[in-house]
C-alpha cells in the first residue's frame, strides 16, 4: 500500500471512528476497531493512539484540557486572509464556548451584503473554568454538541494579523482578556505608523499624538457578537457591565480610510450613518437624534471641515447640534496679556478687535439660522467674563466694547455669563447652557464641556468615565472613548500655534441615534464616508 493511500485511509478511520464514538458511545478502542473492520484495515495499537490523539485535540473527548489553539477551527482562523477586492470591512469579536446574539449577527450579515463589505470576527477566549456556561459546555462536549466557537461565526473567524490599508492594521492575533479594563493599554507603538483594531467586548477609542505631517493614529476595540459570559467575581461582573454588542466598520478611500464603532440595541438592531438595520432588513431612518460638533473656535475654524460637518448633520437629518467653544477669545485672551510681541502682531493684523470677533460669532449663527443649536458653557466663553472682571478698561484696546458689555452683564437676569446674555439678545436659534446645567439626549449627558471635573478640579477621562451617566464632552480636541465617556475632536485647523510638538488633535464629531447609541464620525480630508 502506498504512503498516500495509507494517509487517506487513516483520515477515513478517524472520521468514521468519531461517528461511531458519538453515535453509539463505544470506547475509543472499540470505535477504532469497528472503523478499521469497515474500511478493510488491520487494527493496531498505533492506529488507536492516532485516533485517540485526534479526539483529544479536537474536543471529541474531554478527559484532558483542550487547548483552543490546537483545534482545526483555530488553525483555520490563523490562516484567514483579507479579501483584497473589498473596500469595506466589518470587524467584531466572539468569545469561545459562548452563544452569539443571533439577531445581531444576522443584521450584520445583511448590512455587509448591502454595502458590499467583508466580515471578520476575531477569535476570543475567556480562560476561567468557573464561567457561567462552563458546566453546560463540559456536558455538551461529552455529546459533541458544541465546538470551540459558535458555528454561526466559523465562516468569519479570524486569528491572523492583516494590513487592511497602508495606515491601518487588524490585530486578530492579539488576545486580550475580556475582563481587561483598559484593552488598548500598551499598544501605542506596536504597529508603527498604522492605526490598529483589536478584538474586545469593551468599546474604546484613542487618538495618539503624532508629529506634524504624519498620518493620524487611532487605536480601537471592536465590541462583541457573543453575549455576556463571565464569572460572578468582581472583575467578571465589571466585564459583564461593560460588555458591548458592536463592531467596527472600515471604508477604504484611496490614501485615506473612514472608521466607526457601531453598537446595537438589545434586539440586535443598529444604526450606522443613514441606515437602520433591524430584523434582517436594511432601511433608511428618519434622522439622528443629535450631533455634537468638535470644538469650533471661530477665527481658527477650518472652513472646509465646518462645511463637511454641516453636510454630515444634513445627511443624518439631525434635530439639533451641540456646540463647544464657539467663541475663541483671541482678541482678549489672558494667555497673551503679558506677551507684548504677540500683542503687536495682533494689532498689526487687526485680530485684537473684540467687536470683530463678536460680529463673527453673530454672523455664524445668522448664517446657519435654520439649525437648532445648543451651546455648552465652555472655558473659552469664560475668557470674556474673565477679561471684564480683570482688566482696567482705561488701558484696554477695546474700551468701547468693554463699557457696552459691562452694561449688558450688569443688567443680565439669566446669570450664565456675558456670551449667553449677548446671544439671548441677538439670536433665537441658540440655547445657551450654564456651567453646571444638565442637557440630556436619550441616555447621554451633553451639558459638560470637559474643562471642569469633580469638585472644581481639572476634568479628565478617568473622572468622566466613572460618572453615573454616559456623557459626551469637548475641550481636549482629541476624540476619545472609554466605556460611557466620549470626547469629540475639533473643527479647527489641526495646528494653531500653541499645540506644539506631537498632537493628538483630530477633526471629529459624535452622533447620537434614536436608540441611545452613538459613535464618532471623523472628517478625513473633508469627507466622512464613501457610502
Image (cartoon, rainbow, N blue to C red):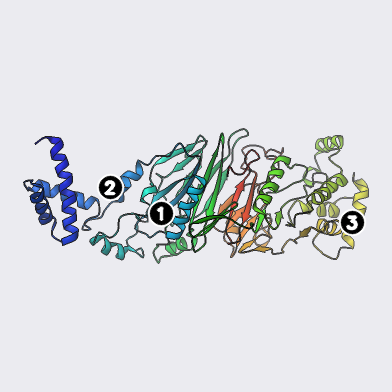
Q: CA distance from mark 3 to mark 2?
A: 75 Å
Query: From the viewer's perspective, is the residue at label 3 or at label 1 nearer?
Result: 1
Q: Is residue 128 above or below residue 123?
A: below
x, y percent for residue 294: 68, 49
Residue name at image x 52 percent, y 61 percent? 265
Judging depth in this view, the residue of 8 and 423 nearest the camera is 8
Circle 2 Cα neighbour tier, 10 Å, few/some/many (<14 / 14–19 / ≥20): few
Q: CA distance from mark 2 to mark 1?
A: 18 Å
Residue behind mark 1? 94
Q: CA distance from mark 3 to mark 1?
A: 60 Å
Examine the image and state in which quarter residue 492 appears: top right
Query: From the viewer's perspective, is the residue at label 2 or at label 1 nearer?
Result: 1
Please give left or right for residue 340 compared with residue 177 in the image: right
Residue behind mark 3? 406
Location of the N terminus by quadrant is top left
Judging depth in this view, the residue of 377 and 279 nearest the camera is 279
Residue name at image x 88 percent, y 47 percent? 355
Q: Is residue 88 above or below residue 449?
A: above
x, y percent for residue 378: 73, 54
Residue behind mark 2? 70
Residue name at image x 49 percent, y 58 percent? 244
x, y percent for residue 22: 19, 59
Location of the C terminus by quadrant is top right
The tag earlier along the polypeptide, 3 or 2, is 2
Labels in figure, total: 3
x, y percent for residue 122: 41, 49
Examine the image and state in which quarter residue 77 appears: top left
The tag earlier along the polypeptide, 2 or 1, is 2
Q: Secondary structure at mark 3?
A: helix
Q: Secondary structure at mark 2?
A: helix
Please give left or right for residue 431 compared with residue 2 in the image: right
Query: From the viewer's perspective, is the residue at label 3 or at label 2 nearer?
Result: 2
Amino acid at each position: 500500500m502506498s504512503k498516500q493511500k495509507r494517509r487517506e485511509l487513516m483520515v477515513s478511520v478517524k472520521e468514521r471512528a468519531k461517528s461511531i464514538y458519538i453515535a453509539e458511545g463505544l470506547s475509543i478502542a472499540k470505535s477504532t476497531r469497528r472503523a478499521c473492520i469497515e474500511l478493510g484495515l488491520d487494527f493496531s495499537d498505533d492506529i488507536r493512539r492516532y485516533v485517540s490523539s485526534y479526539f483529544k485535540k479536537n474536543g471529541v473527548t474531554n478527559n484532558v484540557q483542550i487547548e483552543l489553539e490546537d483545534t482545526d477551527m483555530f488553525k483555520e482562523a490563523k490562516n484567514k486572509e483579507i479579501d483584497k477586492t473589498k473596500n469595506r470591512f466589518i470587524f467584531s469579536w466572539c468569545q469561545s464556548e459562548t452563544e452569539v446574539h443571533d439577531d445581531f449577527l444576522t443584521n450584520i450579515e445583511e448590512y455587509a451584503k448591502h454595502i458590499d463589505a467583508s466580515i471578520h470576527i476575531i477569535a476570543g477566549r475567556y480562560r476561567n473554568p468557573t464561567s457561567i456556561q462552563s458546566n453546560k459546555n463540559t456536558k455538551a462536549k461529552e455529546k459533541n454538541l458544541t465546538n470551540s466557537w459558535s458555528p454561526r461565526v466559523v465562516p468569519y473567524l479570524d486569528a491572523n494579523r492583516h494590513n487592511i490599508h497602508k495606515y491601518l492594521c487588524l490585530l486578530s492575533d492579539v488576545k486580550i482578556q475580556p475582563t481587561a479594563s483598559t484593552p488598548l493599554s500598551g499598544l501605542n507603538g506596536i504597529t508603527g505608523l498604522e492605526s490598529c483594531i483589536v478584538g474586545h467586548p469593551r468599546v474604546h477609542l484613542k487618538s495618539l499624538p503624532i508629529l506634524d505631517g504624519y498620518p493620524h493614529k487611532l487605536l480601537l476595540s471592536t465590541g462583541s457578537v457573543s453575549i455576556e459570559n463571565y464569572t460572578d467575581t468582581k472583575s467578571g461582573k465589571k466585564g459583564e457591565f461593560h460588555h458591548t454588542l458592536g463592531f467596527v466598520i472600515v471604508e477604504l478611500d484611496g490614501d485615506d480610510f473612514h472608521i466607526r464603532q457601531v453598537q446595537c440595541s438589545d434586539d440586535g438592531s443598529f444604526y450606522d450613518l443613514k441606515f437602520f438595520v433591524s430584523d434582517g432588513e436594511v432601511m433608511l431612518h428618519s434622522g439622528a437624534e443629535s450631533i455634537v460638533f468638535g470644538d469650533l473656535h471661530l477665527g481658527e475654524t477650518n472652513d472646509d471641515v465646518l462645511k463637511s460637518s454641516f453636510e454630515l448633520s444634513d445627511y443624518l437629518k439631525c434635530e439639533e447640534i451641540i456646540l463647544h467653544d464657539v467663541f475663541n477669545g483671541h482678541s482678549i485672551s489672558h494667555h497673551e496679556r503679558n506677551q507684548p510681541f504677540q500683542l503687536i502682531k495682533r494689532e498689526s493684523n487687526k485680530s485684537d478687535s473684540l467687536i470683530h470677533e463678536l460680529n463673527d460669532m453673530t454672523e455664524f449663527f445668522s448664517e446657519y439660522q435654520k439649525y437648532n443649536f445648543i451651546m455648552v458653557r465652555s472655558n473659552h466663553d469664560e475668557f470674556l467674563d474673565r477679561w471684564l472682571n480683570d482688566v482696567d478698561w482705561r488701558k484696554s484696546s477695546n474700551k468701547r466694547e468693554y463699557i457696552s458689555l459691562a452694561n449688558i452683564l450688569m443688567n443680565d437676569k439669566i446669570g450664565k455669563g456675558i456670551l449667553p446674555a449677548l446671544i439671548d439678545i441677538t439670536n433665537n436659534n441658540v440655547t445657551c447652557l450654564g456651567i453646571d446645567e444638565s442637557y440630556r439626549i436619550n441616555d447621554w449627558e451633553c451639558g459638560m464641556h470637559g474643562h471642569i471635573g469633580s469638585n472644581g478640579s481639572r476634568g479628565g477621562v478617568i473622572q468622566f468615565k466613572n460618572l453615573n451617566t454616559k456623557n459626551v464632552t469637548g475641550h481636549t480636541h482629541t476624540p476619545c472613548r472609554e466605556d460611557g465617556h466620549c470626547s469629540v475632536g475639533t473643527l479647527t485647523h489641526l495646528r494653531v500655534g500653541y499645540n506644539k510638538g506631537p498632537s493628538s488633535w483630530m477633526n471629529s464629531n459624535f452622533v447620537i441615534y434614536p436608540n441611545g447609541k452613538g459613535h464618532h464620525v471623523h472628517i478625513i480630508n473633508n469627507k466622512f464616508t464613501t457610502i
